Amino acid sequence: MQFSLIPFISSFALTVIFLPLFIGFMRMKHEGQVIRDEGPKWHEKKSGTPTMGGVVFMLAGVISTLWVLIWQKDLNKTAWILIIAFLGYGIIGFLDDGIKLYFKRNLGLKAWQKLLGQIIIAALIIALAFSDHFAFELYIPFAGMVRNSFLFSLFVLFWLVGFSNAVNLSDGLDGLATGLSIIAYATYAWIAYQEKNWVIVVFTLSVIGGLVGFFIFNHKPAKIFMGDAGSLALGGGLATVSIFLHRPWSLLLIGIVFVLETLSVILQVISFQTTGKRIFKMTPIHHHFEMLGWSEWKVDIVFWIVGLIGSIVYLIIWG
């Protein structure tokens, strides 16, 4: 597949060209991140850093996916489902970010509003998959392959909502979620390439190109944050890719850091509500390590290594 790097280059170029302009625009409008009060005190110096940068790499990824697939005459329903999932969750995040910036607060959409939007996008993906005669079957450990439309739909709903939020929770340090997402999308790009699923190859490489371009401005000290617009889009995209490669469970290893970040929050809430004690110094767990004295770079590098190991283990065993 000689054109496989073209979507990567296209998305990278669009991001590095337009992101500085976006940063300049946000600074001119004095639109910056409002740091949550309960976060680490040393994060307060990040207040005012432009956010919503995910809009740029999200659009760059979608544009690159579309024009490459149109050029190759391969723009099918699967491609549209991937784009709708990516854009749909990104739009929810965009609204969340927009409210935070407009009202100068660290809370955007209400929890039920965000959840409702995530469920609606997931339901749309399920309906489109059903109309595309997608195999509604799910492998369940110890039970084998189960063919049940209702069960599969519930799983897809949980997977999309769960992982869009998981990536969102992981976006708390400069470059952390960006690096983890590059690793995860690259792993799926390799799997799709091996399976000759060119639509997913183009989509994943388009996303990676945008993320690599974004990382130039997002690594510590970050000049811009991706915001919920980026993190929700990335999580929704990953979940959809795993499902359409018929490897949904792979995300538990390939996205192991996202899983651990989410589990840390769940365990912390359960522990505090039942015993009044906290398991971690602060959650998501990347803040716990910060509270132990780790630098942001150390947390980033260790977490990226864990994510890379998870992906390598999956490819060795099931790749």
Image: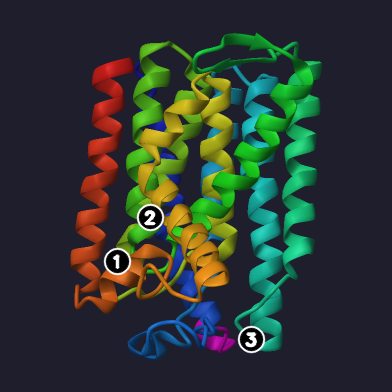
Left or right of residue 44: residue 129:
right
Q: Can you identify the residue that label 2 sits on? A: 178
Name the residue type under label 2: Thr
Q: For the residues marked 1 and 3, what is the alpha-carbon distance in whole angstroms? A: 24 Å
Q: For the residues marked 3 and 2, what is the alpha-carbon distance in whole angstroms? A: 24 Å
Q: Can you identify the residue that label 3 sits on? A: 105
How far across and how far down the image is residue 12, in percent?
39, 48
* SS state under label 2: helix
How far across and how far down the image is residue 15, in percent?
44, 55
Does residue 271 belong to the magenta stretch? no
Residue at left offset 40%, top offset 28%: 188
How far across and how far down the image is residue 86, in percent?
61, 43
In this rendering, does residue 269 appear at all? yes
- The front one of 34 and 159 is 159
- The front one of 111 and 230 is 111
Which sits earlier in the primary sequence, circle 2 or circle 1?
2
Query: What predominant SS class does the magenta segment belong to?
Result: loop
Residue 236 higher or lower than 231, as above or below: above
Which sits earlier in the primary sequence, circle 3 or circle 2?
3
Left or right of residue 175: residue 76:
right
Looking at the rendering, the stretch of residues picked out in magenta corresponds to 27-31
How far across and how far down the image is residue 290, in percent?
27, 74
Name the residue type under label 3: Arg
Given contact means CB atoms under 8 Å apart, are the residues at marks 2 and 1 in contact? yes
Which sits earlier in the primary sequence, circle 1 or circle 3?
3
Q: For the residues marked 2 and 1, what is the alpha-carbon distance in whole angstroms? A: 9 Å
Q: Can you identify the residue that label 1 sits on? A: 219
Residue 151 higher or lower than 165, as above or below: above
